Amino acid sequence: MDAVRIAQPQGPPRSRPKRLAGDKAYSVEWIRAWLRRHAIAAVVPQRSDQAARHRGRPLSFDREAYRRRSIIECCVGWLKECRRIATRFERLAVNFLAMVKLSIVQRILKILFSDRA
């Protein structure tokens, strides 16, 4: 989270997102507490075992924001289809990041210059 830089129309990039979306695996108290301390809204559904023992005001959950998370999930799923990235042939993080970027560029070019358009 410390490496996040979100571009703004004006001014310097923000270093903190407004919301963080995650699946039910991220619905643990220490993650929610960390997000509260950093003024980040949690868009994480509550697990069924937590809902049964939760007392007080129900946890907020934005369904529309959670649905937008599927865009990232599809991108990660596509990246896992790239064998070089899925098996992580590169040992150095800088080389691995370069291969991820190269795969994204390849994907964009494939979409832009496909015969289906």
Image: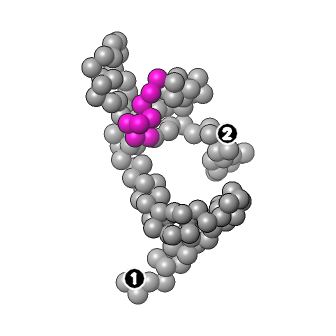
Cα distance, mark 1 to mark 2?
40 Å
Which of 85/100 is in front? 85
Q: Residue 24 colored magenta?
A: yes
Lower sequence index among marks 1 and 2: 2
**Residue found 64% across the figure and 50% down from its top:** 7
How many numbered marks does the figure carry?
2
**Residue found 49% across the figure and 26% down from its top:** 32
Residue 2, disc: 2
Which residue is most to the top? 56
Q: Residue 49 colored magenta?
A: no
Q: Position of residue 68 (x, y in %)?
A: 40, 49
**Residue found 46% across the figure and 76% down from its top:** 111
* Amino acid at pointer 2: Asp
**Label 2 residue SS:** loop
Image quadrant holding the C terminus, namely bottom left
Answer yes or no: is residue 62 visible: no
Structural crowding at the residue carrying mark 2, measured as other residues with C-alpha within 10 Å and reported as few (<14), some (14–19) or many (≥20): few
Answer yes or no: is residue 52 visible: yes
Left or right of 60? Residue 52 is left
User: Of the residues tagged 1 and 2, which is closer to the observer?
Assistant: 2
Structural crowding at the residue carrying mark 1, measured as other residues with C-alpha within 10 Å and reported as few (<14), some (14–19) or many (≥20): few
**Residue found 69% across the figure and 64% down from its top:** 95
Magenta stretch in the rendered image: 22-29
Left or right of 103? Residue 22 is left
* Amino acid at pointer 1: Ala
Q: Position of residue 14 (x, y in %)?
A: 66, 42
Task: From this view, report whether residue 8 is shown above or below residue 94.
Answer: above
**Label 1 residue SS:** loop
Task: From this view, report whether residue 33 is shown above or below residue 56.
Answer: below
Q: Mark 1 points at which residue?
A: 117
Left or right of 74? Residue 5 is right
